[in-house]
Image (cartoon, rainbow, N blue to C red):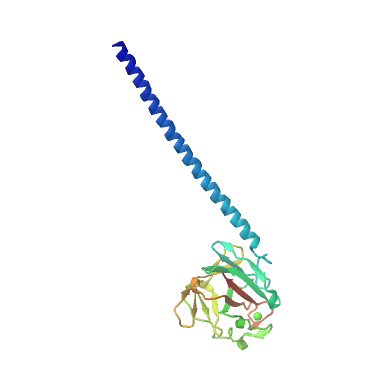
């Protein structure tokens, strides 16, 4: 009996040991997996940081916060896009680095009772054809009656037309997240009477002449228009 009891105690002790040992191995396994996850996450985080660092170093230097003449900004995915002069165009053209996705154009109200932004958009720089002090009715794009029809609240379409301008005004614009600024949302383009297509389907860059007749005199004064090259990468 005593021997049986002793044998039973030994068996019980061995069973408890095996159980403890198994639990220890399981715990060790869990710790190893957790360590592995932390290691992978750490490696991914490090990789992302290195990539961002390299990408930032390769980005062009932004020359200005707002375009020099009209104070425009271009926003995409919640971030302002980088801008620079185009030295090959005598610094008269502002180049904006863009992704082929929807974007916003921000512009100052400039003390106008009715803030507005007129945009003549095309697929090459032939649209950069406005001269200082030129009457609007002699320009190919911005003359009276050349405003392209759109919906009351705009429908995200930027019309591409060298003889007709996008007229962003009134209910087609919204207050921007910057004091005294307004914005317009662009999500697609359309050539005259063609159905709109997404910006991701663009075959090349976009070229904009932006204009606002701040003093309402019907003349494109030197400080009322600007040439913008949207470099879409
Ligand atoms: Ca004017």
Q: Position of residue 201 (x, y in %)?
A: 48, 73
What's the residue at 40%, 25% (across, down)? 17
Residue projecting furthest to the left = 1
Query: 197 or 30: which is nearer to us?
Result: 30
Q: Position of residue 165 (x, y in %)?
A: 55, 81
Q: Is residue 101 above or below residue 191?
A: above
Residue projecting furthest to the top = 2
What's the residue at 49%, 44% (across, down)? 37
Residue 108 shows in this picture: no
Residue projecting furthest to the bottom = 138
What's the residue at 58%, 74% (across, down)? 116
Q: Which quadrant, please, contains the C terminus?
A: bottom right
Q: Is residue 40 above or below residue 138?
A: above
Ligand 1 placement by image quarter: bottom right
Q: State which quadrant residue 135 falls in.
A: bottom right
Residue 139 shows in this picture: yes
Query: 172 or 155: which is nearer to us?
Result: 155
Tag count in the figure?
Answer: 0
Q: Position of residue 130 (x, y in %)?
A: 64, 83
Q: Position of residue 121 (x, y in %)?
A: 56, 79
Q: Horizontal placement of 103 versus 132: left or right?
A: left
Q: Horizontal placement of 34 versus 1: left or right?
A: right
Query: 188 or 154: which is nearer to us?
Result: 188
Q: Which quadrant, please, contains the N terminus?
A: top left
Q: Horizontal placement of 169 versus 64: left or right?
A: left
Query: 76 or 61: which is nearer to us?
Result: 61
What's the residue at 35%, 21% (across, down)? 12
């Amino acid at each position: 009996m005593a021997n049986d009891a002793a044998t039973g105690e030994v068996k019980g002790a061995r069973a408890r040991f095996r159980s403890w040992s198994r639990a220890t191995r399981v715990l060790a396994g869990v710790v190893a997996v957790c360590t592995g996850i932390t290691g992978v996450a750490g490696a991914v985080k490090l990789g992302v940081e290195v990539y961002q660092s390299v990408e930032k170093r390769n980005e062009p230097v932004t020359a200005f916060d707002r375009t020099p003449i009209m104070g425009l900004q271009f926003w995409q995915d919640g971030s302002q896009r980088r801008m620079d002069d185009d030295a090959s165009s005598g610094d008269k053209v502002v180049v904006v680095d863009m992704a082929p996705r929807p974007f916003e154009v921000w512009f100052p109200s400039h003390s106008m009772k009715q803030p507005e932004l007129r945009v003549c958009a095309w697929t090459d720089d032939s649209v950069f054809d406005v001269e200082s002090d030129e009457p609007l009715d002699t320009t190919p794009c911005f003359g009276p009656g050349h405003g392209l029809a759109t919906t009351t609240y705009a429908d995200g379409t930027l019309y591409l037309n060298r003889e007709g301008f996008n007229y962003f005004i009134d209910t087609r614009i919204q207050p921007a997240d910057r004091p005294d600024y307004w914005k317009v949302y662009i999500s697609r383009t359309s050539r005259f009477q063609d159905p709109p297509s997404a910006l991701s389907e663009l075959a090349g860059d976009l070229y904009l002449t932006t204009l606002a007749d701040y003093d309402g005199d019907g003349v494109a004064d030197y400080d009322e228009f600007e040439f913008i090259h949207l470099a879409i990468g």
